[in-house]
Amino acid sequence: MGVTPPVLVEYYQWVDLSGVGQQARELKELISTQITQLQMAVEKMDNEFNLR
């Protein structure tokens, strides 16, 4: 899995500290999933580009 951008790490820490709770954790999961999907898509595009 890719590296989490520092800004998101800070956001995650703030969310944990602020005790926003379940809704924030669900949002964090959603964001993480989307980032992972984006990274996979970029890698796939990169691989296809390199094959040409």
Image: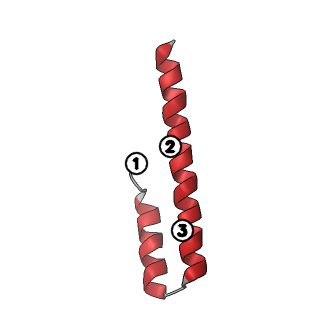
Decide if residue 6 is on the left or right side of residue 41: left
Q: Position of residue 12 (x, y in %)?
A: 46, 72
- Secondary structure beneath disc 3? helix
Q: Residue at the location (44% across, 80% down)?
A: 16
Residue under label 2: 39
Residue 1's tag is: 1
Q: Residue at the location (55% across, 29% down)?
A: 45
Residue 25's tag is: none
Q: Are marks 2 and 1 in contact (CB under 8 Å)?
A: yes
Figure quadrant of residue 4? bottom left
Q: Position of residue 2 (x, y in %)?
A: 40, 48
Decide if residue 16 is on the left or right side of residue 38: left
First in residue order: circle 2 vs circle 1: 1
Q: Residue at the location (53% across, 75% down)?
A: 25
Figure quadrant of residue 26? bottom right
Q: Is residue 47 positioned above or below 4 on the image?
A: above
Q: Residue at the location (50% across, 43% down)?
A: 39
Q: Residues within 10 Å of mark 2 (few under 14, many from 20)?
A: some
Q: In the current view of this chain or complex, which residue is farthest to the bottom?
A: 19
Q: Is residue 28 positioned above or below 45 on the image?
A: below
Q: Amino acid at mark 3?
A: Lys
Disc 2 to disc 1, C-alpha distance: 8 Å
First in residue order: circle 3 vs circle 1: 1
Disc 3 to disc 1, C-alpha distance: 16 Å
Q: Amino acid at mark 1?
A: Met
Q: Amino acid at mark 2?
A: Gln
Residue under label 3: 28
Q: Position of residue 21 (x, y in %)?
A: 54, 84
